[in-house]
Amino acid sequence: MRSIKDQAVIREEETSTDDLDLSKAVQVSMPNLKFSTETISLRTPVSLLGGMK
């Protein structure tokens, strides 16, 4: 089993964006998509909230 530090290094080196080929991306239109105005509650760490602002 790998240590937590080893796992963190692997996560930093391997991202899901490595698997994406944006040259094959197509633009889509969703005319029936409606914006939601419902309030939601999220529990997140303070450090994550700072990144969202």
Image: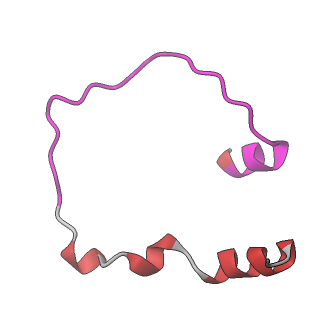
Q: Position of residue 41 (x, y in %)?
A: 65, 22
Residue situated in front as seen by the camera: 25 or 13: 13
Image spot of residue 47 (x, y percent): 82, 49
Locate the C terminus and report the quarter of the image it occupies.
Answer: top right
| Name of the residue lying farthest toward the top | 38
Task: Say if 52 sits above or below 38 in the image.
Answer: below
Quadrant position of the N terminus in the picture: bottom right
In the image, what residue occupies the spot 80% across and 81% down? 6
Residue segment shown in magenta: 27-51
Q: Residue 15 lies in what quarter of the image?
A: bottom right
In the depicted structure, whether residue 1 falls above or below residue 38? below
Q: Measured from the top left, where is residue 16 in percent x and y?
A: 49, 71
Q: Quadrant of residue 40?
A: top right
Within the magenta stretch, is there residue 39? yes
Q: In the rendered structure, does residue 1 fall within the stretch colored magenta?
A: no
Image position of 8 with respect to 33: above or below: below
Residue toward you, 32 or 53: 32
Q: Position of residue 52 (x, y in %)?
A: 66, 46
Quick check: 19 left or right of 16? Answer: left
Q: Main secondary structure of the magenta part?
A: loop
- Residue at left offset 17%, top offset 39%: 30
